[in-house]
C-alpha cells in the first residue's frame, strides 16, 4: 500500500503550466526529497499534497484515498515550514498543544504527547520559553515538535533548514534523519540543496521547469543520471561535460574528445552497446573520477582507466581535498584530488579517467545513452 500516490498531476495558473504530468509514488515509511532549482515547481507540488493548492488535473492519493477535494485538516498530514510559523505570544508548550486543543484532545493526553515529543527532540528545558527567547535551531525543533504531536500519516517539510547557518544546518540534517529512522513515518521533503537530498532521502525526485526529470534512489541518481540536467545538478562539484565523438578504436568503439590529438578513450561493452561510430555525444565524468595516472590503488584493479593530459588553471584547497580548475583537450574541467598530489597552476599532468563511472549523453536530446 502506498502512503502517497500522485497520478498524471498538472497545475496551471492561467496559460502558464507549472507542473507537467507528474507521476510519483512513496511507499509507507519512505523519505522522499523533492529537489531542483528555484521555480522548478517543487514547493507547488508540496502545497498540492498539503491541500493548500488545488490541482488542474490528475489525482493525489494518501493511503489509497483520493484527497483532491479534501481540506488540509482532513488529510491527516503535518507540515514544517521554512519560516517556523510559531505563535510569538505562546510558550513552546502552548505552540505544540494549540492544534490538539483545536481538535478537543483532553489535557492529560496533550501533556503526555508533548512530554514524549519534547524528549524525542531534546527540547524539554525550552517548554516554558517563548519563540523570541530561542535560537534558530531551537525554533526549528519546536516547529518539528508541533508537527510530531499530531502523529500524522504524512510529514511534509518545506525547506526547513534554509534559514540556518551552515554548521547548524548539518546538525539539524542529522537530527531529521535520526527522527525519521525512529518514527518511520512517510516524509516528503522539499529542498534546493542536493546535499540534503542525497543524505536524507531514500528516493529523490529531481524536478526542472515543472517536469519530473528522474525519480530514483540517491545511488542511481548520482551514478546513472537520466539526463544532463540531473547529472549537472546532483553532485558537488558538478559533473564535467565534454563534447566528443564515437570512433572505431583498436579494441572496439571509443570516445574521442573534441580537440584531443591523443588516443581515443575505449568504452566498456555496456557503453559501446548504446552508441555507434560517428555519433556526436557528450562525455560526462565526475570530478572525483579523475586520479593521477601514476596511482595504483587497489580499488581500481579490474577497472579500465585511461590517462589524459590535464592543464591546471587554478586550484582551490579545501583542506581534505584540492579542487582543480583545469582544461582537458582544450575544454573546461573540474577535478578533485588529494592535496599532496595536486599539480600547481600552469602545470600539465596525466590523470586517469575511471571509464566504468563515466556517462554518455546524446548531444541533441541530452538524455543518457
Image (spheres, rainbow, N blue to C red):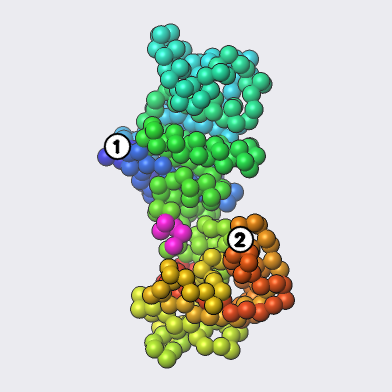
Residue holding disc 1: 64
Q: In screen coordinates, is 34 left or right of 6?
A: right
Indicate the secondary structure of the residue bearing disc 1. loop
Quarter residue 340 falls in? bottom right
Does 56 lie within the magenta span? no
The picture places residue 35, in percent across and down from the top left corner, at 51, 49
Closer-to-camera residue (87/201): 201
Main SS of the magenta part reads helix
Residue sticking out furthest to the left: 1
How many residues crowd mark 2 within 10 Å: few (<14), some (14–19), many (20+)?
some
Closer-to-camera residue (36/121): 121
Residue sticking out furthest to the top: 107
How many residues crowd mark 1 within 10 Å: few (<14), some (14–19), many (20+)?
few
- Image point (39%, 25%), residue name: 151
- Image point (59%, 27%), residue name: 138
Q: Are marks 2 and 1 in contact (CB under 8 Å)?
A: no
Cα gap from disc 2 to disc 1, whole angstroms: 48 Å
Does 221 lie within the magenta span? yes
- Which residues make up the magenta segment? 219-223
Would residue 75 be visible to someone looking at this image? no
Closer-to-camera residue (104/23): 104
The picture places residue 190, in percent across and down from the top left corner, at 51, 42
Closer-to-camera residue (225/264): 264
- Tally of marks: 2
- Image point (51%, 31%), residue name: 80
Per the rendering, the mark at residue 78 is none
Residue holding disc 2: 321
Q: Quadrant of the N terminus?
A: top left
The picture places residue 27, in percent across and down from the top left corner, at 33, 42
Indicate the secondary structure of the residue bearing disc 2. loop
Q: In screen coordinates, is 356 left or right of 17?
A: left
Amino acid at each position: 500500500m502506498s502512503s502517497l500516490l500522485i497520478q498524471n498531476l498538472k497545475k496551471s495558473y492561467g496559460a502558464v503550466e507549472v507542473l507537467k504530468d507528474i507521476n510519483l509514488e512513496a511507499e509507507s515509511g519512505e523519505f522522499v526529497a523533492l529537489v531542483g532549482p528555484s521555480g522548478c515547481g517543487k514547493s507547488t507540488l508540496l502545497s498540492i499534497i498539503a491541500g493548500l493548492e488545488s490541482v488542474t488535473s490528475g489525482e493525489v492519493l494518501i493511503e489509497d484515498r483520493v484527497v483532491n477535494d479534501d481540506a488540509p485538516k482532513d488529510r491527516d498530514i503535518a507540515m514544517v515550514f521554512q519560516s517556523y510559523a510559531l505563535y510569538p505570544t505562546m510558550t513552546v508548550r502552548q505552540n505544540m498543544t494549540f492544534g490538539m486543543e483545536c481538535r478537543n484532545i483532553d489535557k492529560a493526553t496533550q501533556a503526555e504527547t508533548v512530554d514524549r515529543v519534547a524528549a524525542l527532540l531534546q527540547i524539554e528545558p525550552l517548554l516554558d520559553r517563548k519563540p523570541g527567547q530561542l535560537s534558530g535551531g531551537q525554533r526549528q525543533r519546536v516547529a518539528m515538535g508541533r508537527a510530531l504531536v499530531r502523529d500524522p500519516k504524512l510529514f511534509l517539510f518545506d525547506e526547513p533548514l534554509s534559514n540556518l547557518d551552515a554548521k547548524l544546518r548539518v546538525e539539524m540534517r542529522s537530527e531529521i534523519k535520526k527522527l525519521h529512522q525512529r518514527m518511520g513515518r512517510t516524509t516528503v521533503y522539499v529542498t534546493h540543496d542536493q546535499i540534503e537530498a542525497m543524505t536524507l532521502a531514500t528516493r529523490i525526485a529531481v524536478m526542472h521547469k515543472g517536469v519530473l526529470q528522474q525519480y530514483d534512489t540517491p545511488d542511481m541518481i548520482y551514478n546513472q543520471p537520466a539526463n544532463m540536467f540531473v547529472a549537472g545538478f546532483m553532485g558537488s562539484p558538478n559533473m564535467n561535460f565534454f563534447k566528443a565523438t564515437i570512433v572505431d578504436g583498436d579494441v572496439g568503439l571509443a570516445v574521442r574528445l573534441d580537440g584531443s590529438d591523443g588516443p581515443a578513450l575505449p568504452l566498456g561493452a555496456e557503453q559501446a552497446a548504446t552508441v555507434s561510430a560517428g555519433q556526436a555525444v557528450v562525455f560526462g565524468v565526475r570530478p572525483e573520477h579523475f586520479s593521477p595516472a601514476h596511482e595504483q590503488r587497489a580499488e581500481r584493479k579490474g577497472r579500465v582507466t585511461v590517462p589524459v593530459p590535464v592543464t591546471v588553471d587554478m586550484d582551490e584547497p579545501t583542506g581534505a581535498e584540492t579542487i582543480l580548475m583545469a582544461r582537458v583537450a582544450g575544454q573546461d574541467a573540474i577535478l578533485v584530488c588529494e592535496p599532496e598530489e595536486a599539480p600547481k597552476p600552469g602545470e600539465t599532468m596525466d590523470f586517469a579517467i575511471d571509464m566504468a563511472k563515466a556517462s554518455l549523453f546524446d548531444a541533441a536530446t541530452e538524455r543518457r545513452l
